[in-house]
Image (cartoon, helix red, strand yellow):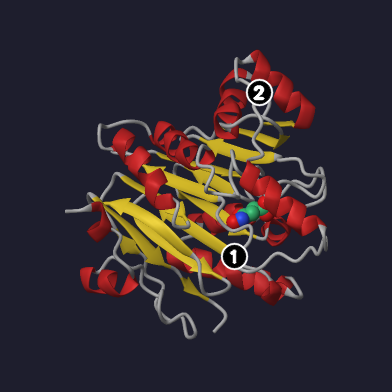
Amino acid sequence: MSSRRRFIKQSGLASLGLIAAGQSSQATPKKHKSKKVTRPLAIATWKNGVQANVAAWDVLSKGGRALDAVEQGVKVVEADPNDMTVGYGGRPDRDGIVTLDACIMDETGNAGSVCALENIKHPISVARRVMEKTPHVMLAGDGALQFAKEEGFAEENLLTDKAKKEFQEWRKTSDYKPLINIENHDTIGMLALDAQGNISGACTTSGLAYKMHGRVGDSPIIGAGMYCDNEVGGAVATGMGELVMKTLGSYLVVELMNQGMSPQKAVEEAIARIVKKIPGYQDFQIGYLAINKAGEVGAYSLHKGFNYALYANGENQLIDSSYYLK
Ligand code: SD4
């Protein structure tokens, strides 16, 4: 099957039975069954998740570890200058500096993270080194850069000409208003379930374009941008990080699954929590993905327009998420 045909939209998926139940009728979400797919599987946020999944599948299909799959998967997007919210080519902060956030978590519950990291193309791999080679979980800013250099990562300029030009345009007004689904939304969060039944997750981003220098979002925060519990499942978040941080979204999703909810019901509940707790939530987009140990998948967002890539049963598909606000 050609890769083009694999990127089936939601309508086609419905007939294949590959859309998580509840995805098209969340106005009255009565059924919260999540679709079960065979392991291994990889799932990733936004359309760039499709190319990330290809790299992840390469690892998973050979019996590889979920941790390696998520790292290899998100690295593809980190290196892609066309994705302007992750890694190389990411939009800078309001001082014109590209700062990166990333985290990773393995099947044993180990976690590593970096935030406000400059000049390193693959923050996810630095996060993995933090996890594997230090007694800490998170390194920030200069300390993260120092560690990366000690580990042999090369410093390079991440600000592409395109991002620089856009930034110079933006500076003419300096109007800070993230647009739902348009600006800032391509962060990659990825979860994988490997053939051995182990779960890992990764999340990496340049954060919000034109954020204040030093602003850190949800993506590198274990439990906010991503969380895994190998006995239960995993979750990742994308969108306006401040809302995810205030509700510790990914941990919430996994804990809800721990208490018996399906992945679909859990992500719907996490969105409901934002709706209940955060005034003005309508102005922002949030998207959650979740998987459980059984290979069930859930996806839900605040607004229309969130999509994700699911690679399972040998098929890599881009799927439109269901959403809360009609
Ligand atoms: C952040 N959550 O820094 C990230 C941005 C994002 O899709 O996910 N964009 O707030």
- Label 1 and label 2: CA atoms lie apart by 29 Å
Asked if residue 154 is positioned above or below residue 279 in the image, the reply reads: above
First along the sequence among labels 1 and 2: 2
Q: Measured from the top left, where is residue 6 in percent x and y? A: 25, 57
14 and 46: which is toward the camera? 46
Residue at the image position 51 percent from the left and 52 percent from the top: 235
Ligand 1 lies in quarter:
bottom right
Q: Amino acid at mark 1?
A: Ile
Nearest to the observer: residue 88 or residue 279: 88
Local crowd at mark 1 within 10 Å, few (<14), some, or many (≥20)? few
Residue 152, horizontal then vertical, whole percent: 60, 15
| SS state under label 2 | loop
- Which amino acid type is marked by label 2? Glu
Instruction: Examine the rendering and report whether any part of residue 198 can be seen.
Output: yes
Check the picture and name the quadrant holding the C terminus: bottom right
In the figure, residue 120 lies in which quadrant?
top right
SS assignment at label 1: loop
Residue holding disc 2: 155
The answer to the question of whether label 1 and label 2 lie on touching residues, with beta carbons closer than 8 A, is: no
Q: Is residue 36 left or right of 106 when viewed as pictured? A: left
Q: Is mark 2 within 8 Å of ligand 1?
A: no
- Residue wearing tag 1: 182
The residue depicted at 36 percent of the width and 60 percent of the height is: 318
